[in-house]
Amino acid sequence: MNPSPAKLVFSFSDCALKERLSSRLCSAYGRWLGGFRTLELRRGKTREGFEIEALGGGSAVLASREMVSAVSFNKYALNLAALEATALSALEAAAAAGKVLLFDELGPMAMKSGKFSERAVELLFSPAPCLVFYRRGAAVFEDAFSKMNDTVIIELTEAGWAEAVAAAEAWLDRLAGEMEINKK
């Protein structure tokens, strides 16, 4: 049996679609996943910011219109300490536990933290299996993905939803099976 590619990467531009797939995969495969999710903070129909949620517990506001910070992206003040403490700690714990590393999401906000970006690239180039969602335009991450031989990149669109779900579930089913065999 050929091993699964070590990295499954989804590029996206629609946050709601990304959150839908990420939520579905975390719900069905949470036992084998570790890392973080990035969720929109909304007030009615207005996006007010983003929250980092560590799989296994803990969350922090990453970006907000109401925060004050020396670092910003577009209309949001950024809390890079939250990214480093919550997301990076969750990735480190997942790597130590031998789980599939969930990076939800890598993009321009994450790139504002040199500490996070550097360690994320190291983890992406490690042998650990990684499930990644990223926004186009995150040059550090796009460059890293283009250099990886063991990576499958899928563009996440509404039209390609069924194929994206099938690919992700087949990949995770295979990895989960391999992880169970390795435990015995």
Image (tube, rainbow, N blue to C red):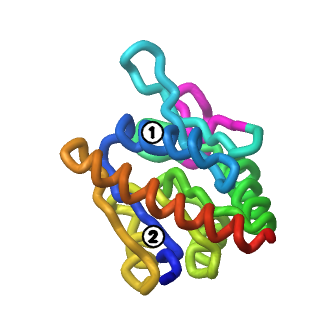
Query: The C terminus lies in which quarter of the figure?
Result: bottom right
Please name the amino acid that badge 2 sits on. Phe
Residue at x-position 63% and y-position 70%: 178
- The mark lying in front, picked from 2 and 1, is 1
Classify mark 2: residues with Cα within 10 Å, few (<14), some (14-19) or many (20+): many
Is 60 included in the stretch rendered in magenta?
yes
Q: Position of residue 147 (x, y in %)?
A: 41, 85
On screen, residue 183 versus residue 39, left or right, reads: right
Residue named by callout 1: 19
Classify mark 1: residues with Cα within 10 Å, few (<14), some (14-19) or many (20+): some
Compared to residue 13, the image places residue 170 above or below, namely below
Q: Position of residue 179 (x, y in %)?
A: 68, 67
Badge 1 marks a residue whose secondary structure is helix
Residue named by callout 2: 141
Residue at x-position 37% and y-position 49%: 165
Q: Please identify the quarter of the rendering in which residue 9 is found.
A: bottom left
Q: Going from the N terminus, do you reach mark 2 or mark 1 first?
A: 1
